[in-house]
């Protein structure tokens, strides 16, 4: 084995893989180990490239790369870009943007500037050529189209000769292009005008500037026929979709990488900027449609804060750049060392103890490991010494014993949670890290609901602070907010710049606690402190309390989590969600701050079918609760006052769950249809009303056969405990069915129907039940009867069954009879519970339902409802 | 001699419209709308020619032709006025000093007020051209409308003249041309005539093939007309594409025959139905 001492330090001094927003095809790049994130990212890209086929749509890929600062995201992206450049087929177009803040148009401009005017012009021409090929195929047949497409791919300028030879109509091509653009970039005429103007030498420059998001003069804007510059974020999104579509329709894959998504999506205090999140969501949906590949990269915080439906769109394409293992540390070192000593595949001059120390002291953070490697190599190289644990430790101390390290003091990781706990509502805490590369500020804020939020500022590098007053510059870079508490930590004591900055900060805020801890992972500890903080105040789910129908509803809270609860805790609640308006039912959580009252923590809404919901709440961290048991939750955009204003002064309807059983005598053609029509009216009213959780059952019955040739059919339970809408559909099918066996004229299977109901109603069902019977004939007696009506073959005793039902708590009987009251069989009064009786042909359905306690109205209620608020435990 | 292609474009309605405009002493505005290769420019020239005949100025007729290249209307109106000035100069028409000064100031007109400024200029020009001892007529052809509003602007400018303004319109649905339903005559402030050109159907193409041949030769037509109908049966075809294809077929047929004997004695030069169908099928495959 050929072992040589590296001639120069193979590691980057800052340990970072910085990225220019410029994608070059020089094939060079930082060395890399086959870290899992690198490999997984590349495997997605490989899938994309192998599935790419010009002329198709919907074959793109999306991938999310997440990880803490320094975990190697940028490194993985660089590797991806290099491998893409080496792709043996068509070299994909690659666009990389490092997002700086919430200003999406600014990112768009930087992305668009990566494609120059001639290239964009060629893409525009190729796009027309692709369409012209398709048009040729449409007019002259598939073969001619394929030939034209192939010729135009090889030489896009042939498009002009096709026009001269009258082989294709320019207007038809532009018309087809307009249709395609409507799919790609919405109904935006501006994009087609600019795109076609790119091919006009007079307008080319202005068209390029406009598409690139730059300002253009009023005269140029008029000439192009565009309404104004691309400053609207939504237009920028269309622009990116268009760019990708141009690339892929032209026959080459396109990869768009948006790095530092947290800066785009997370605003002050870590709140999600819903508009920008929506933009990402749209890009995630649309770029794969346009056969492009979208890579989003961001820190753990943004990944956690993305809504679930967006996360789900990535499927398995979620790549985490987590802490590297010892084995991967070895690979990483080997990769960098090979870059300067290609013949050497060892980690020489690192000894095993040195590698272990790098892994341990670097905390598994790739950036920190590389930083330490650089420092250790610098120490060892003058003597061509081997690098042991002692060398690494010495490197960590900056080569000399630390001047200000104070190991007697409690560690930063222990102190921070206590300092955070002291932070009152509305107060701020500035944590400032000084490290080997620069100064980083973390602003911790506690909002009115007691939720801590953290915002990390970008690293200000030491070389950016050089000047006449570096100490003052360091203090300014720390960005200490006025009135905020401060806490300083040096993660690289011994580094001259870090030590000096720490001293300057301490001089500025002498009362602030400070720490000097080699290798301390400040960003991880800050995040950990925020995530792990127990609740300061109890959390409650906001509901409407309505103890009685017609009563005044009150806002109340179902206790979910007590003060002091830590993340991971679960709680559950059962609520009834009434019909809501178009915005849905609001699930709001409040923190109950004793005398100060409730403070809103989160409010999300979901459009749900009315009904009872078992909700499980999981405390993900203070301020963030995941609700399961309801689907389609999205952030509520209305103000609290607007939502509360929607609560009605009185509840018009009963709201508690109710089970309505409709039993219909379905023998005889004409009568059957009229009865079904009445039940349809009933169900329609129930379906549209604000009644509580309604479940409907449908039973049809006829008559007993009493014939040896025709077996006696049981009653037909068509639907049991279904939503009114579903019951309506079943009812529709019943109308077209053959009438049931009529049996004898003086009785029907009422008793069998009652038996079926008794059998199916479980003892545990405690909700209100309404049995509504619609028909004409009385039941069969259980045995031979003086009336000479034939007895029920199954010996069902209708009186006993009806009595059993009548004793059931919460059961109401109703009857609709074909005959008017004076002609109806007396049994029908009993089927109607002695009071709820109606004549089929002459009844007011709403009034009848009200008599059964089934009031309905069109009232819409924004919150879940409970009848009794459980006590806090 | 004009071919009577039944249904391609009726000249009589536009002739009647122009006649009315000339009699009333008001401007004529004509929009020629059609797909590519349907002969929009040829029809525009035909309309301008009809107007010339109706004005009976004995050939004293000045026409400015402007191809609209982008959406800034001002530049194209300005260009039309400058071209009219050139035409006036070329014809050595004598104008008043005031009008000459105004014409020389075309380049100075502010964009914010150009319709009004050019309106006055056009009116004076119209008056002075008509007031010559040998009166002149004038017209403007704007090719390739980008927006329907351009017609309104041009009507504002030429509303007080005795002239003709013709616009050609690409009848497609995309962002570089106005939708056809925005060019209905009732949508414009001034009386406007719209001529719609359509691709030719088989019977029109048969008529075109025979007619064009007969215009050029007393011999009978070498195209089998059933064959002509067959090869154009799949979809209506714009006139320019039809003529190009017929010309290509004729050239190709000639190139295949070596003999010196001319048509019609040399029957090999005839294009039978079978030959036409086979040849066109092969030609489509070569594209």
Image (tube, coloured by chain):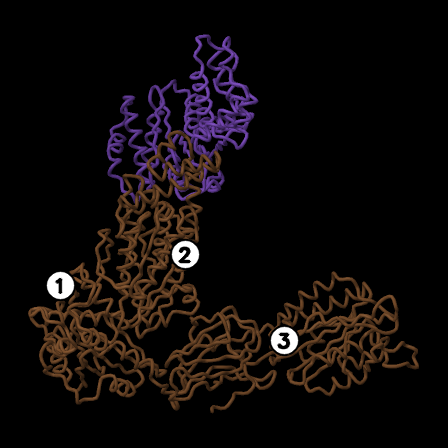
Among the two numbered marks 3 and 2 on one chain, the one whose residue lies closer to the N terminus: 2
- Residue matched to label 1: A4
Q: Is residue B183 left or right of residue A15?
A: right
Q: Is residue A870 left or right of residue A270?
A: right
Chain ID at mark 1 = A
Marks 2 & 1, CB-CB < 8 Å contact = no
Among the two numbered marks 2 and 1 on one chain, the one whose residue lies closer to the N terminus: 1
**Residue A501 in view:** no
Q: Quadrant of residue B40?
A: top left
> Which of pointers 1 and 3 indicates the residue nearer the eye?
1
Other-residue count near label 2 (Cα within 10 Å), few / some / many at <14 / 14–19 / ≥20: many
Q: Is residue B198 above or below residue A647?
A: above
At horizontal 21% and vertical 88% (from top left) the residue drawn is A410
Q: Colour of chain A?
A: brown
Residues at marks 1 and 3 on the same chain? yes
Q: Position of residue A359 (x, y in %)?
A: 23, 74
Q: Nearer the viewer, residue A202 or A69?
A: A69
Q: Is residue A710 above or below residue A766?
A: above
- Residue matched to label 3: A694
Q: Is residue A79 left or right of residue A536?
A: left
Q: Colour of chain B?
A: purple
Q: Position of residue A174 (x, y in %)?
A: 41, 41
- Residue matched to label 2: A286
Q: Position of residue B216 (x, y in %)?
A: 46, 14
Helix or strand or loop: what does disc 2 sit on? helix
Q: Quadrant of the N terminus of chain A?
A: bottom left
Q: Is residue B277 left or right of residue A460?
A: right
At horizontal 14% and vertical 84% (from top left) the residue drawn is A405
- The answer for how far apart the CA atoms under marks 1 and 3 are is 81 Å
Among the two numbered marks 1 and 3 on one chain, the one whose residue lies closer to the N terminus: 1
Chain ID at mark 3 = A
């Amino acid at each position: 084995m050929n072992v040589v001492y590296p001639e120069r330090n193979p590691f980057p001094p800052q340990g970072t893989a910085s990225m220019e927003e410029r994608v070059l095809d020089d094939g060079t790049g930082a060395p890399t180990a086959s870290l899992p994130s690198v490999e997984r990212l590349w495997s997605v890209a490989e899938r994309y490239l192998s599935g790419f086929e010009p002329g198709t749509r919907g074959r793109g890929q999306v991938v999310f790369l997440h990880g803490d600062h320094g975990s190697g995201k940028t490194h993985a992206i660089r590797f991806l870009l290099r491998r893409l450049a080496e792709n043996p087929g068509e070299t994909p177009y690659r666009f990389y943007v490092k997002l700086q803040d919430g200003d999406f148009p600014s990112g768009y401009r930087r992305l668009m500037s990566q494609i120059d005017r001639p290239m964009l012009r060629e893409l525009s021409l190729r796009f027309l050529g692709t369409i012209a090929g398709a048009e040729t195929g449409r007019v002259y047949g598939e073969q001619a189209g394929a030939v034209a497409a192939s010729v135009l791919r090889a030489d896009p300028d042939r498009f002009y000769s096709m026009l001269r030879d009258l082989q294709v109509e320019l207007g038809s091509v532009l018309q087809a292009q307009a249709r395609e653009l409507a799919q790609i970039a919405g109904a935006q005429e501006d994009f087609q005008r600019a795109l076609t103007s790119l091919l006009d030498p007079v307008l080319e420059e202005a068209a390029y500037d406009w598409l690139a998001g730059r300002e253009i003069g009023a005269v140029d804007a008029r000439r192009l026929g565009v309404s104004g510059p691309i400053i609207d974020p939504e237009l920028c999104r269309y622009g990116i979709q268009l760019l990708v579509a141009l690339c892929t329709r032209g026959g080459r894959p396109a990869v768009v990488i948006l790095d530092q998504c947290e800066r785009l999506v997370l605003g002050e205090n870590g709140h999600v900027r819903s508009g920008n999140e929506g933009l990402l969501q749209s890009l995630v949906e649309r770029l794969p449609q346009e056969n492009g590949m979208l890579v989003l990269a961001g820190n753990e915080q943004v990944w956690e804060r993305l809504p679930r439906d967006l996360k789900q769109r990535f499927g398995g394409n979620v790549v985490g750049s987590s802490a590297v293992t010892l084995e991967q540390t070895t690979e990483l070192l080997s990769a960098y060392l090979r870059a300067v000593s290609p013949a050497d595949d060892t980690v020489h001059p690192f000894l095993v103890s040195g590698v272990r120390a790098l892994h341990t002291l670097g905390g598994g953070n790739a950036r920190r490991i590389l930083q330490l490697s650089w420092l250790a190599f610098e120490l060892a190289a003058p003597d061509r010494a081997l690098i042991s644990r002692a060398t690494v430790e010495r490197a960590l101390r900056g080569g000399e014993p630390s001047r200000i390290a104070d190991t007697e003091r409690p560690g930063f990781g222990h102190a921070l949670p206590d300092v955070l706990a002291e932070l009152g509502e509305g107060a701020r805490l500035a944590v400032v890290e000084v490290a080997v590369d620069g100064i980083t500020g973390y602003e911790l804020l506690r909002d009115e609901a007691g939720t801590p939020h953290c915002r990390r500022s970008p690293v200000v590098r030491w070389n950016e602070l050089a000047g006449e007053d570096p100490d003052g510059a360091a203090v300014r870079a720390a960005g200490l907010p006025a009135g905020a508490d401060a806490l300083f930590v040096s993660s690289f004591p011994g580094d001259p710049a870090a030590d000096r900055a720490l001293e300057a900060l301490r001089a500025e805020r002498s009362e602030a606690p400070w720490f000097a801890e080699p290798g301390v992972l400040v960003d991880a500890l800050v995040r950990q402190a925020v995530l792990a903080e127990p609740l300061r105040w109890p959390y409650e789910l906001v509901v409407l309390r309505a103890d009685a129908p017609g009563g005044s509803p009150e806002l109340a809270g179902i206790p979910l989590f007590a003060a002091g609860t830590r993340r991971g805790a679960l709680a559950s609640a059962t609520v009834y969600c009434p019909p809501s308006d178009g915005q849905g039912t609001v699930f709001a959580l409040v923190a109950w701050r004793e005398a100060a009252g409730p403070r809103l923590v989160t409010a999300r809404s979901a459009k749900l079918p009315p009904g009872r919901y078992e909700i499980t709440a999981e405390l993900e961290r203070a301020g963030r609760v995941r609700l399961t048991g309801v689907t389609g939750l999205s952030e509520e955009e209305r103000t609290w006052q607007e939502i509360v204003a929607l609560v009605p002064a009185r509840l018009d309807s009963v709201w508690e769950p109710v089970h309505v059983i409709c039993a219909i005598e379905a023998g005889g053609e004409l009568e059957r249809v009229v009865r079904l029509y009445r039940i349809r009216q009933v169900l329609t009213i129930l379906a549209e009303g604000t009644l509580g959780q309604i479940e409907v059952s449908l039973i049809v019955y006829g008559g007993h056969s009493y014939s040896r040739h025709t077996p006696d059919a049981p009653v037909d339970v068509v639907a049991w405990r279904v939503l009114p809408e579903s019951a309506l559909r079943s009812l529709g099918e019943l109308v077209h069915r053959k009438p049931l066996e009529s049996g004898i004229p003086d009785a029907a299977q009422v008793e069998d129907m009652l038996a079926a109901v008794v059998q199916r109603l479980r003892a545990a069902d405690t909700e209100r039940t309404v049995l509504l019977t619609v028909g004409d004939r009385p039941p069969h007696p259980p045995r031979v009867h003086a009336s000479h009506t034939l007895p029920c073959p199954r010996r069902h005793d209708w009186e006993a069954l009806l009595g059993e039902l009548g004793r059931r708590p919460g059961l109401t009987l109703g009857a609709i009879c074909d005959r008017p009251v004076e002609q109806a069989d007396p049994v029908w009064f009993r089927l109607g519970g002695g009071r709820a009786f109606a004549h089929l042909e002459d009844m007011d359905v709403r009034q009848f339902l009200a008599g059964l306690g089934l009031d309905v109205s069109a009232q819409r209620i924004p919150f879940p409802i409970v009848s009794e608020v459980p006590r806090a435990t | 001699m004009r071919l009577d292609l039944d249904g391609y474009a009726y000249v009589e309605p536009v002739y009647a419209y122009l006649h009315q405009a000339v009699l009333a002493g008001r401007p004529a505005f004509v929009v020629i709308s059609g797909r590519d290769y349907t002969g929009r420019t040829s029809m525009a020239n035909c309309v301008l020619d009809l107007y010339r005949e109706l004005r009976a100025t004995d050939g004293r007729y000045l026409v400015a032709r402007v191809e609209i290249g982008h959406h800034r209307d001002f530049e194209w109106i300005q260009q039309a006025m400058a071209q009219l000035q050139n035409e006036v100069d070329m014809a050595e028409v004598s104008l008043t000093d005031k009008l000459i000064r105004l014409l020389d100031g075309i380049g100075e007109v502010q964009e914010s007020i150009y319709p009004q400024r050019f309106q006055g200029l056009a009116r004076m020009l119209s008056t002075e051209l008509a007031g010559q001892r040998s009166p002149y007529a004038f017209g403007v052809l704007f090719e390739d409308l980008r927006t329907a509003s351009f017609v309104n602007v041009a009507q504002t400018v030429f509303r007080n003249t005795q002239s003709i303004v013709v616009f050609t319109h690409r009848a497609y649905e995309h962002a570089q041309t106005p939708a056809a339903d925005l060019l209905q005559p009732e949508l414009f402030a001034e009386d406007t005539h719209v001529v719609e050109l359509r691709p030719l159907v088989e019977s029109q193409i048969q008529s075109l093939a025979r007619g064009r041949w007969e215009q050029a030769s007393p011999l009978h037509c070498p195209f089998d007309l059933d064959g002509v109908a067959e090869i154009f049966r799949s979809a209506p075809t714009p006139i320019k594409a039809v003529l190009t294809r017929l010309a290509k077929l004729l050239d190709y047929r000639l190139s295949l025959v070596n003999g010196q004997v001319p048509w019609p004695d040399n029957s090999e030069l005839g294009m039978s139905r079978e030959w036409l169908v086979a040849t066109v099928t092969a030609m489509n495959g070569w594209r």
